[in-house]
Amino acid sequence: MKLLRIGATGEEIPAVLGEDGRIFALAELTGDIDGAFLATGGTGRAAAALAAGQLPEVDAVGLRIGAPVARPGKLVCVGLNYRDHAAETGAVVPERPVVFMKDPATVVGPYDQVLIPRGSVKTDWEVELAVVIGREARYLASPDEAAAHIAGYAISNDVSEREFQLEYSSQWDLGKSCETFNPMGPWLVTPDEVADPQALGLRLAVNGETRQADDTKNMIFEVGYLVWYLSQYMVLRPGDVINTGTPAGVALGLPGTPYLRAGDTVELSIDGLGTQRQTFIDA
């Protein structure tokens, strides 16, 4: 099942995408697609209502698509999780996951404009598989337990300002938490539609030129391991999002470091999870 939120910023309504491409409202089941909805079996109720023909159809023509999860409690990111990306940035391949937090308020819709921060000269892109938590994960015994705690998957663009990130502080927060720096969606795709999260092709193009093309099979730390690992150090709650890392092809590692400028367009896709497209403008 593919869950989404449609409408103007701050006025989104929860919905589900039918197999025939029609969109159906979930307003009779929930006020939003959020942690409370996920924690109480909301996806199962939505699937049952859709199958029974109980949901009203929505005319979504011209409506904005928002991020598929409202108000994530945490946005946890994993850095350097592909060997080729570590190599292109001159970093050592990590022995343990590199973990940092990103302001959850950076999450915006998959087609929203992204703001290049004032003073920025090194705004960069990162296509990533996002994992959305559906059930509290606390001290999981093994990575095998992780699947039962995952509500679904989505595309994230972990936009980054490299000068802020790497030159202005010993931590990465400044370059990761600028406003609009995490487009997400278009859908939250439930695990039954993702046969293997470690077999998904990722792609990103800038102004029509392919910059990133890889597969989640090349992650250093797989999805199940990451959920297990993080649960040893923090409680993962329903609605939390994990960005699982990006492959090679970011501007930081390319010849000439072609960082983003106002007017540039970035397009992202992950197998089965849809596509994104953002135009970058000056803040």
Image (tube, grey):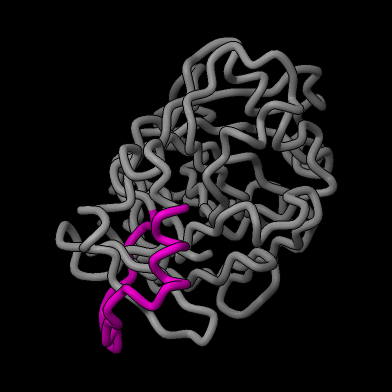
Quarter of image, res 199: bottom right
Using the image, determine if residue 43 lies above or below residue 18: above
Say which of 119 and 137 sits in front: 137
The answer to whether residue 64 is magenta is: yes
Which residues are drawn in magenta? 44-68
Q: Main secondary structure of the magenta part?
A: loop
The answer to whether residue 51 is magenta is: yes
Residue 179, position in %: x, y? 30, 46
Confirm whether residue 59 shows in the render: yes
Using the image, determine if residue 17 lies above or below residue 200: below
The residue lying at 44 percent from left, 74 percent from top is 17
Q: In the rendered view of the protein, which quadrant contains the C terminus?
A: bottom left
Quarter of image, res 213: bottom right
- Compared across the picture, whether 267 is left or right of 161 comes to right
- Compared across the picture, whether 11 is left or right of 4 comes to left
Residue 243, position in %: x, y? 56, 40
- Residue closest to the far front: 52
Quarter of image, res 71: top left
